[in-house]
Amino acid sequence: MKNTLMVAASICFAGVAAFADGHRSAAPEDARVYIISPADGAVVSNPVTIVFGLEGMGVAPADVEVENTGHHHLLIDTDPGTLDMESGLPATDQVVHFGGGQTQVTKDLPAGTHTLQLLLGDWTHVPHDPPVMSEVVTITVEE
């Protein structure tokens, strides 16, 4: 059974990166994060509901230090190669934090084509080692 919780809430959590000590939490070998919906190539209209999936790890809110857990960060039109994987992830319109442990969001996106990707962060918003990152999903939002 997939370790997926359905929570209809969204917050941008500024984070606790100040607690990060440069040490990245280890990720289990079988850890996998993915976007359940929308599917890659989907044409959608606003509001868009994005549902997150996770296997091999658990979800825990930021500030809760538990081994083999993390919380979701949604990358919107963002290349993860531009992010500092050694530090806490920034909270921006393109890097959306789900520090409450949420596993879905309903959000308005501008009309056009967008890329979506999930990146799991530990209790300090620092990506695990190795990073637990989903495949990129490309969607088109109609007006």
Image: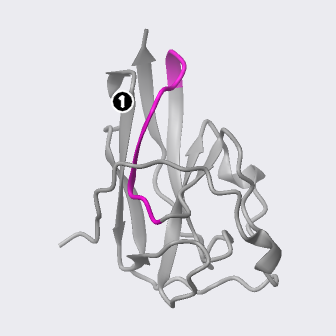
Q: Which residue is mark 1?
A: 41
Q: Which residue is the extreme one toward the top?
A: 143
Residue 98 rendering spot, x and y as whole percentages = 53, 57
Q: Quadrant location of residue 3?
A: bottom left
Callout 1, which amino acid?
Answer: Gly
What span is in magenta? Answer: 101-113
Mark 1 residue crowding within 10 angstroms, few (<14) / some (14–19) / many (20+):
few
SS assignment at label 1: loop
Q: Which quadrant does the N terminus fall into?
A: bottom left
Residue 132 location (% of width, % of height): 52, 69
Q: Residue at x 48, y 48 (%)?
A: 10
Q: How many marks?
A: 1
Q: Is residue 96 above or below residue 42?
A: below
> Is residue 112 in view from this perspective?
yes
Q: Residue furthest left?
A: 1
Name the residue at 68% across, 71% down: 126
Q: Which residue is painted at 65% across and 40% down in the image?
A: 94
> Which residue shows up at 77% across the image and 70% down it?
17
Residue 86 seen: no
- Say whether residue 20 is magenta: no
Q: Is residue 100 left or right of residue 104?
A: right
Residue 114 on image: x %, y %? 53, 29
Q: Residue furthest bottom?
A: 67
**The C terminus is located in which quarter?**
top left
